[in-house]
Image: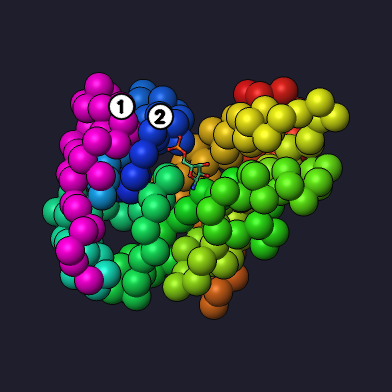
């Protein structure tokens, strides 16, 4: 039985694309459905091109719990086991988290706990840090606060614009997220008493260095 992943998006979906590409030929990992809260999210087009089911659930005019219940229903209808938040711009409630305990994962463009929230890359740039990066973490009820699974560091170059830095962080995200979601779908990631338990293979690392060539 393959590990079935549901991906939630709100926008362009380059991380979704990295997941679609990574698992296209993989029988053990399946992107079962892509759900967007925005009908015009380009990621929906990426999913359709890859032959993956799409669902749009508009959040407007609904309270959060009702919206989350609709998300859960759609994910369950597609027999999803793990949920990947890939640029999903909504805070989720316990209604959602309780439906997938320890199985909701988010990608964030900074080295958490530094620079949570929106525009994390710009926050890091403005703070003048020399090293930033990307984090994949379990989702809890807070904003970018759940237990960290994996991080990749990205060095700021002297002549970097904020956009250069953002682009390099995004490349790191595209390496990190498929690696983690593969581990999740293969049953090699667990949250036990709030702590990460991971079965890491020799060709994997939960700490990627920004100096390494992009795989
Ligand atoms: C990424 O930077 C991700 O870390 C953040 O939202 C952005 C989504 O980008 N959560 P994309 O839609 O995957 O291109």
Q: Nearer the viewer, residue 38 or 105?
A: 38
Quarter of the figure that contains the C terminus:
top right
- Quarter of the figure with residue 82: bottom left
- Callout 2 touching callout 1 (CB < 8 Å): yes
Q: Is residue 161 left or right of residue 87?
A: right
Q: Is mark 2 within 8 Å of ligand 1?
A: yes
Instruction: Inspect the magenta stretch and tell me whether residue 93 lies in it.
Output: no
Residue shown at 61%/50% (left/top)? 120
Instruction: Inspect the magenta stretch and tell me whether residue 44 lies in it.
Output: yes
Residue shown at 57%/48% (left/top)? 119
Q: Is residue 123 left or right of residue 12?
A: right
Say which residue label 2 marks: 17
Of marks 2 and 1, which one's residue comes earlier in the chain? Answer: 2
Q: Nearer the viewer, residue 198 or 46?
A: 46
Q: Nearer the viewer, residue 159 or 152?
A: 159
Q: Is residue 210 left or right of residue 36?
A: right
Q: How far across and how far down the image is residue 94, in percent?
A: 34, 75
Label 2 sits on a secondary structure element that is helix
Q: Residues within 10 Å of mark 2 (few under 14, many from 20)?
A: some
Which label sits on residue 74? none
């Amino acid at each position: 039985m393959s590990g079935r992943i549901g991906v939630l998006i709100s926008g362009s979906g380059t991380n979704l694309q990295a997941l679609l590409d990574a698992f296209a030929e993989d029988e053990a990992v399946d992107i079962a459905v892509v759900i967007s809260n925005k009908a015009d999210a380009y990621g929906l087009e990426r999913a359709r091109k890859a032959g993956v089911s799409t669902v749009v659930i508009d959040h407007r005019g609904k309270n959060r719990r009702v919206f989350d219940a609709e998300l859960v229903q759609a994910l369950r209808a597609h027999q999803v086991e793990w949920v990947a938040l890939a640029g999903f711009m909504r805070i989720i409630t316990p209604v959602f988290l309780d439906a997938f305990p320890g199985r909701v994962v988010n990608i964030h463009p900074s080295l958490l706990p530094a620079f949570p929230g929106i525009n994390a890359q710009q926050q890091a740039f403005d703070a003048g840090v020399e090293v930033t990066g990307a984090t994949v973490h379990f989702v809890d009820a807070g904003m970018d606060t759940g237990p960290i699974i994996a991080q990749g560091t990205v060095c700021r170059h002297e002549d970097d614009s904020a956009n250069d830095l953002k682009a390099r962080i995004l490349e790191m995200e595209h390496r990190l997220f498929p690696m983690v979601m593969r581990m999740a779908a293969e049953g090699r990631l667990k949250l036990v008493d709030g702590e990460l338990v991971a079965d890491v293979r020799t060709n994997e690392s939960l700490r990627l260095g920004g100096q390494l060539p992009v795989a």
